[in-house]
Amino acid sequence: MRFDVYDRCAVLGQYILENRATVRETAARFGISKSTVHKDVTEALKRSNPALFRSVKEVLDQNKAERHLRGGEATRRKYLLLHDARKESGSVL
């Protein structure tokens, strides 16, 4: 099913708002690129539904403010898993 750009941006905006989702999570959920999601919710949504845009912008701004924490947590988990795998295999490093 194809969406009109304004329909799509409204659906994406609602999803972000309801799930407090990131652009990356939204893109993965709908099978489209991150740049498409970002462009839809920052440009097209602003023109088609300003009230929804303001709400979505708050979520996106919060996600942006927290992204360094998410990245740090992902790196920490990565190295913990790597450490555990080496420990199980008996590797010294």
Image: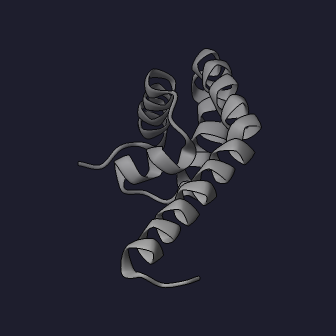
Q: Residue at x 43, y 30 (%)?
A: 15
**Nearest to the observer: residue 7 or residue 53:** 53
Q: Is residue 8 left or right of residue 79?
A: left
**Residue at the spot 61% in from the left edge and 26% down from the top edge:** 56
Q: Quadrant of residue 45?
A: top right
Q: Is residue 20 above or below residue 82?
A: above
Among all residues in the image, which is located at the extreme left? 1
Question: What is the x, y in percent for residue 52?
Answer: 57, 19
Of residues 25 and 90, the one nearer the viewer is 90
Quadrant containing the C terminus in the rendered view: bottom right
Residue 3: % across, % down: 35, 44
Task: Tell me if 60 is positioned left or right of 15 in this view.
Answer: right
Please state which of residues 5 and 28 is positioned toward the viewer in this rendering.
Answer: 28
Left or right side of 8 for 24: right
* Residue 51 against residue 9 in the figure, above or below: above
Q: Position of residue 46 (x, y in %)?
A: 66, 30
In the rendered view, does 6 fall on the left or right side of 53? Answer: left
Number of marks in picture: 0
Residue at position x 23%, y 48% in the image: 1
Q: How is the image coloured?
A: one colour
Residue at 72%, 39% (x, y): give it. 64
